[in-house]
Image (cartoon, helix red, strand yellow):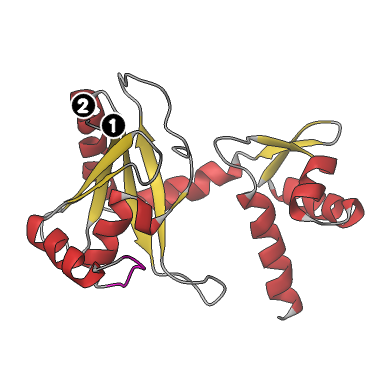
Amino acid sequence: MSRTLQTVTGAVRILEAFDADRTEWRLSELAAFLDLPTSTLHEQLETLTATGLLHKLGRGRYGLGWRLLKLSSALYSSLPWYGPAHDAMNALARGTRRLAFVAVLDRGTPLQAGPQVLCIARSVQGREGEAVEGETRFELPARDTASGRLLFALHGLALPLPGWPDQAAAIRAAGLAVTQDEWSPGTSSLAAPVRGRGAKCCVPWASACPAAG
C-alpha cells in the first residue's frame, strides 16, 4: 500500500468511526477503538480538524465538522432519484408507523470484501414500538435484511442462503422481499424497489415491524 493510500485510508477509518450511535469521541477511546497509538491518532485528528472535516468539542474530544455537510449535499444533489425515494420512505413511515429507510447497493472497491448494502436515509415519523436493534447501522447485513436480499436478487448477486437462486428468482418475480426474525428477533421487514421514470437502478425502502405470530 502506497504512503498516500495509507494516509487516506487512515483518515477514512477515523471518519467512519463516527455514526448515529457515536457522534463524538475522546482521543483515548478512539485510539483504543482503532488500535492506534494516541500520538499517531492525535496528529491525524488535528489534520482532519484543520481541514474542517472534524471539529474539536473540547479538550481531547472530537465531532464531525460542518464541511461534511457540503460534501453530503453535493452527493444528494447528484442523485436524481434521491428525492422521490426519500418521499416514498417518509410516506411509508407515516403510513405504517414503523421504521423506514432507503438502502442502496455499493459495488465495492478493491479495499472492500465485496458488494455492500448501505442505508443512506431513515425515517421514524410517527413510529410506534421500541427501537430495532442495529437500526442506526450504515452497512446492513445483506443476507439478513429484506433490502439486502432484494438488491442482491435484482443485481444477480449470490448470497450464502439455502436455495438462494430460487429465492432470488421469486423475489424478482414478486418485486419485493420479506424477512422475519432474521435481522433482529421479533421483527420482520419488507423491501420493494423505488423506480424513477426511465431509471435503470433500483433503490429499495424497507420497514421493520413486529413479527406476526
| Secondary structure category for the residue under label 1 | strand
Q: Is residue 166 left or right of residue 139?
A: left
Q: Residue at x 22, y 62 (%)?
A: 201
- Residue 6 locus on image (x, y percent): 72, 71
Q: Is residue 78 visible?
A: no
**Which amino acid is tagged 2?**
Thr
| Secondary structure category for the residue under label 2 | helix
Check residue 148 in the rendering and tell me which mark sits there, or answer none: none
Q: Of the residues under marks 2 and 1, which one precedes in the sequence?
A: 2
Which residue is under mark 2?
96
- Find the magenta span and give its range: 157-161
Q: Quadrant of the image for the N terminus? A: bottom right
Say whether residue 160 is magenta. yes
Q: Residue at x 32, y 21 (%)?
A: 127
- Is there CB contact under 8 Å for labels 2 and 1? yes
Q: Magenta residues: mostly which secondary structure?
A: loop
Q: Is residue 11 left or right of residue 121?
A: right
- Residue 32 locus on image (x, y percent): 81, 48
- Residue 154 locus on image (x, y percent): 21, 65
- Residue 114 locus on image (x, y percent): 45, 71
**Which amino acid is tagged 1?**
Cys
Check residue 209 in the rendering and tell me which mark sits there, or answer none: 1
Q: Quadrant of the image for the C terminus? A: top left
Q: In the depicted view, which residue is nearer to us: 46 or 91?
A: 91
Q: Residues within 10 Å of mark 2 (few under 14, many from 20)?
A: some
Residue found at the very far bottom of the displayed protein: 2
Up-down relation of residue 167 to residue 174 (above or below): below
